[in-house]
């Protein structure tokens, strides 16, 4: 009779095997995919925040069109390092990490229906304020800005030369003469000072602390009569007024001038951006849903999925209770006494856990990781796309490895627990045997 009962345990053991795999897999998903800290840890593990400045931004700058045919008077390649330093000072890696982690900690609970809604506020006002100082220290005061200055003077002389006033036949002025005159008048320290003043004027407008700005470059103060006379040559003082008119009253640019250049849509976006900078950009569940769904049915399907995810997570304990109740039933069905009823399920749990631990480890190590790498095709991409896909592959592999590692840990815990339980049963058996011997 006992062998018949034990024969009935074979399909039950197989069922236990399946249920245990399901419980461990679902728990691993809950511990990783449904956990905001999982994503935060993956970003840190992949060194993503430093990677932005080490690889992504350099690749983006390399793609900027600064070759022939570009209207830009400045070659960005000449001060790429300064641009990167400025970006890193304005948006340092710790700040990027802070924003990502704050976002995941409100988004993930919403996706798994732990919260009915969420609100995330992106505060950038202090970053914009720091941008002004970063531009001053990292770019305007850098050695590389000397080359920028040279390029800018050449560009300005190229623009000014065709507009020269009518000059006497004896006066021959070349574009190089104009460039040299500009350099004598508009010195590098003077230009840096004017640009720093302009930055100090514009930043409060962008942050919303001021409603107007005016940028004034008093070129007429730098290009004096003496500079113009040197350019015209001796004996041509009569043309000084014409030359002065050519220089004009300097250059100024105001918020009104800027708005005149914008259409209604661009002007509205500018005002929105200033408001976001001043008050912070608030993103909540309604914004997310509007961005994700075009119709109410898709939104309802999303809510249904969130609901069932929440129900499943709340009943996770049931998924563990059922296989262990089944294991206890196997013990009573196949055991003769209390010791065998305890040892039998522990032996089953030990070997099933061992098989699954080795199976997961070998499957991922010998086949899964290689298959995943071959499935992610990064060939055929260049520039920023190639750089991003390279890191995306690393993140995906690391995430899968963490998921598999979480499953292995649970099987290891079960393996250890069952081993300890078997040792306890062995001690029980030994003590009982000695007690019977002493009694006899």
Image (tube, grey):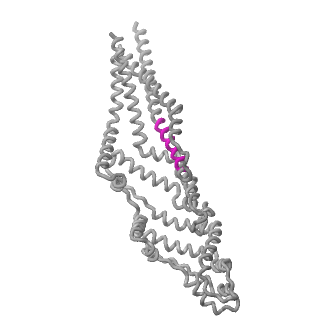
Residue 60 x, y percent position in the rendering: 55, 57
Residue 14 vertical placement versus 141 (above, below): above
- Magenta residues span 386-405
Residue 303 x, y percent position in the rendering: 31, 46
Please identify the quadrant where the C terminus is shown: top left
Image check: 268 left or right of 368?
left
Name the residue nearer the viewer: 296 or 400.
296
Please identify the quadrant where the N terminus is shown: top left
Question: Residue at coordinates 48% horizontally, 45% vertically from top-left?
Answer: 41
Residue 364 vertical placement versus 48 (above, below): above
Residue that protrudes farthest toward the top in the picture:
440
Residue 287 makes an appearance in the image: yes
* 24 inside magenta stretch: no
Q: How many marks?
A: 0
The secondary structure that dominates the magenta segment is helix
Name the residue nearer the viewer: 214 or 325.
214
Residue 337 makes an appearance in the image: no
* 395 inside magenta stretch: yes
Residue 145 vertical placement versus 178 (above, below): above
Residue 49 x, y percent position in the rendering: 52, 52
Residue 255 x, y percent position in the rendering: 45, 75
Image check: 350 left or right of 175?
left
Question: Residue at coordinates 35% horizontally, 44% vertically from top-left?
Answer: 112
């Amino acid at each position: 009779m006992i062998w018949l009962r034990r024969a009935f345990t074979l399909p039950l053991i197989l069922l236990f095997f399946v249920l245990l795999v399901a419980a461990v897999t679902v728990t691993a998903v809950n511990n990783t995919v449904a956990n905001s800290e999982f994503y935060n840890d993956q970003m840190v593990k992949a060194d993503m925040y430093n990677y932005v400045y080490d690889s992504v931004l350099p690749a983006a700058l390399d793609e900027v069109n600064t070759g022939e045919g570009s209207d830009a008077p400045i070659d960005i390649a000449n001060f790429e390092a300064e641009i990167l330093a400025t970006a890193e000072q304005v948006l340092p890696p710790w700040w990027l990490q802070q924003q990502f982690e704050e976002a995941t900690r409100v988004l993930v609970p919403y996706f798994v229906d732990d919260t009915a809604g969420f609100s995330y506020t992106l505060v950038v006002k202090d970053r914009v304020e720091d941008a002004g100082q970063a531009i001053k220290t990292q770019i305007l005061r850098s050695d590389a800005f000397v080359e920028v200055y040279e390029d800018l003077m050449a560009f300005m002389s190229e623009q000014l030369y065709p507009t020269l006033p009518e000059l006497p036949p004896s006066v021959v002025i070349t574009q190089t003469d104009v460039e040299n005159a500009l350099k004598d008048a508009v010195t590098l320290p003077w230009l840096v000072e004017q640009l720093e003043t302009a930055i100090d004027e514009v930043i409060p407008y962008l942050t919303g602390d001021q409603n107007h700005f005016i940028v004034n470059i008093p070129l007429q103060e730098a290009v004096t009569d003496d500079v113009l006379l040197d350019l015209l040559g001796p004996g041509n003082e009569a043309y000084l007024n014409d030359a002065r008119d050519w220089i004009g009253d300097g250059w100024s640019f105001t918020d009104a001038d800027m708005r005149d250049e914008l259409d209604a849509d661009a002007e509205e976006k500018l005002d929105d951006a200033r408001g976001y900078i001043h008050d912070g950009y608030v993103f909540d569940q309604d914004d997310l849903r509007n961005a994700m769904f075009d119709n109410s049915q898709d939104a309802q399907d999303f809510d249904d999925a969130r609901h069932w995810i929440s129900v499943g997570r709340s009943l996770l304990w049931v998924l563990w209770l059922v296989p262990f109740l089944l294991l206890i039933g196997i013990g009573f069905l196949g055991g003769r006494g209390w010791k065998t009823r305890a040892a039998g399920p522990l032996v089953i749990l030990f070997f099933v856990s061992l098989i699954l631990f080795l199976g997961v480890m070998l499957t991922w190590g010998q086949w899964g990781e290689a298959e995943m790498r071959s499935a992610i095709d990064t060939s055929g991409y260049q520039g920023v796309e190639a750089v991003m896909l390279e890191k995306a592959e690393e993140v995906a592999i690391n995430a899968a490895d963490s998921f598999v590692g979480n499953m292995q840990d649970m099987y290891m815990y079960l393996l250890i627990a069952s081993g300890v339980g078997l040792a306890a049963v062995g001690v029980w058996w030994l003590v009982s045997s000695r007690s019977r011997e002493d009694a006899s």
